């Protein structure tokens, strides 16, 4: 019996920043962002969106038509936690009115934790094939203004409904892991932005890829040619291209031809180029992009997937595309979501970036902006308050 992803929906905030505009403002050649990083736009969350509202909106679409009593678990992966103790998924569970007979927990290990949660959920589904797990990955990628990381920000949440006999992809049991204590990117609990040595992190990413692949190969006995397409954790598109070039060079001494590179990964990069980095959600959005933006039918193809979380933990694994998967994709909704975002001026972007609620016991309301199906209203006595919005993101 196959287990894997039955539905895959993402949500990204309704505002975006054109990297050409950012380049002009920061006196950088725009080609550095467009070609050097491979990015065009990044989604920017307004003050009344956070990881909870983004995940709840994505989840609303992922569980539409599903019996809520079949959802036995909500796993919430993030590195943008809104509370040290309470799992963000408990708010989502409340907003979606899921049954009380459901377990909810938050998991963390930088951008990797979503894949770890996926792998930990699958044996449960094998044992309980009538049950489903709602896997949420949600993050706001934030670097300092005027730093090299600034053009690699972004925001999004992805909701993957995991089940037995999945309609989209079945996850294969073999996987390769790599863990090493490195300080390439981290965010102490008292800081709003990550501390990052970007160039070091790109080097570690490639090292981790080689090591996780070697372990995966040992476990699976598969060759690179057994995989038809590839998805990578994508902090920026050029990183995924470099990663794939590295993977090919490890397996084949000849450099990869540009058309082969394009066929292997380009479809997986379409969405990320438009919404930027989304940390834990990034690999799942790459997968959605691959499935939705590949013209040819990928039924029964094997996809190689690489997840990397700074600090660092990495995993290489694979998925088999299920026949008939195209009928269950959210291509039109995702296209509408991306095309209906509003561009921000630099001034508005910096205002969103700098917005912070007071940290006292008072009642503080956030200003109202365009959001998804839910919005973060503000805080009262240190409690976060959320509300449902009348219009779905596609129609607002
Ligand atoms: N036209 C075209 N390309 C240009 C260019 C121009 N005018 N100017 C620079 N570039 C290219 C560089 O050659 C480089 O490409 P290469 O790596 O293929 O050589 C790329 O743009 C980036 O420029 P570079 O100066 O090397 O790096 P940077 O100081 O801008 O930092 C990151 C880039 C990714 C390190 C930075 O954005 C960062 O810290 N990001 C956050 C951390 C992250 O994403 N880590 C990834 C692993 S998770």
Image (cartoon, grey):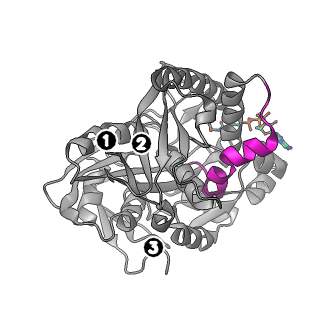
Which percent across, then down, holds residue 311?
Answer: 49, 26
Which percent across, then down, holds residue 215?
Answer: 50, 21
Labelled pair 2, 1 in contact (Cβ < 8 Å): yes
Residue annotated with mark 1 = 122
Residue at screen point 42% across, 80% down: 391
N-terminal of the pair, mark 3 or mark 2, is: 2
* Total numbered labels placed on residues in the image: 3
N-terminal of the pair, mark 3 or mark 1, is: 1
Q: Nearer the viewer, mark 3 or mark 2?
A: 2
Residue at screen point 62% across, 71% down: 339
Which percent across, then down, holds residue 255?
Answer: 79, 29
Q: Which residues are magenta?
A: 254-278
Quadrant of the drawing holding the N terminus: top left
- Could you give the CA–CA distance between mark 3 and mark 2, rounded to whole angstroms? 40 Å
Of 123 and 84, which appears nearest the observer? 123
What element does badge 1 sit on? Answer: helix
- Please check the rendered image and state whether residue 274 is part of the magenta-colored stretch, yes or no: yes
Q: Within 10 Å of the Cα at label 3, are there few (<14), some (14-19), or many (20+) other Cα atoms?
A: few
Q: Is residue 342 above or below residue 291?
A: below
Q: Within 10 Å of the Cα at label 1, are there few (<14), some (14-19), or many (20+) other Cα atoms?
A: many
Of 7 and 224, which appears nearest the observer? 224
Q: Is mark 2 within 8 Å of ligand 1?
A: no
Q: Is residue 216 above or below residue 55?
A: above
What element does badge 3 sit on? Answer: loop
Would you say 379 lies left or right of 331 here? left
Residue annotated with mark 2 = 171
Residue at screen point 80% across, 42% down: 258
Residue annotated with mark 3 = 368
Q: Tell me which image quadrant ligand 1 sits in.
A: top right
N-terminal of the pair, mark 2 or mark 1, is: 1
């Amino acid at each position: 019996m196959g287990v894997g992803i039955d539905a895959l929906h993402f949500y990204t905030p309704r505002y975006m920043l054109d990297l050409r505009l950012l380049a002009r403002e920061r006196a950088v050649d725009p080609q550095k962002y467009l070609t050097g990083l491979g990015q065009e736009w990044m989604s920017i969350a307004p003050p009344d969106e956070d990881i909870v509202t983004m995940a709840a909106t994505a989840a609303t679409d992922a569980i539409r038509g599903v019996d809520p009593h079949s959802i036995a678990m909500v796993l919430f992966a993030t590195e943008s936690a809104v509370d040290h103790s309470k799992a963000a998924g408990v708010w989502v569970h409340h907003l979606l009115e899921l049954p009380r007979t459901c377990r909810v927990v938050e998991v963390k290990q930088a951008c990797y934790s979503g894949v770890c949660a996926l792998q930990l959920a699958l044996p449960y589904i094998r044992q309980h094939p009538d049950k489903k797990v709602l896997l949420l990955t949600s993050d706001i990628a934030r670097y300092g203004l005027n730093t090299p990381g600034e053009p690699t920000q972004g925001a999004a949440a992805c909701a993957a409904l995991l089940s037995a006999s999945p309609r989209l992809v079945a996850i294969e049991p073999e996987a390769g892991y790599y863990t090493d204590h490195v300080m390439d990117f981290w965010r102490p609990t008292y800081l709003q932005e990550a501390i990052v040595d970007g160039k070091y992190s790109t080097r570690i990413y490639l090292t981790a890829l080689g090591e996780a692949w070697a372990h995966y190969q040992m476990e699976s006995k598969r060759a690179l040619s057994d995989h038809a397409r590839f998805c990578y954790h994508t902090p920026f598109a050029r990183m995924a291209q470099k990663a794939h070039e590295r993977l090919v060079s490890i397996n084949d001494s000849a450099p990869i031809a540009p058309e082969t590179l394009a066929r292997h990964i380009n479809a997986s990069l379409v969405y990320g180029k438009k919404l930027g980095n989304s940390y834990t959600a990034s690999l799942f959005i790459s997968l959605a992009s691959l499935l939705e933006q590949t013209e040819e039918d990928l039924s029964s193809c094997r996809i190689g997937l690489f997840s990397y979380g700074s600090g660092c933990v990495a995993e290489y694994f694979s998925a088999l595309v299920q026949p008939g998967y195209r009928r269950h994709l959210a291509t039109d909704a995702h296209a509408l979501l991306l095309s209906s975002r509003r561009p921000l001026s630099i001034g508005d972007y910096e205002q969103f970036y700098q917005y912070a609620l007071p940290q006292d016991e008072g009642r503080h309301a956030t200003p109202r902006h365009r959001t998804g199906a839910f919005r973060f209203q503000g805080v009262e006595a240190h409690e976060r308050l959320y509300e449902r919005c009348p219009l779905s993101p596609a129609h607002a």
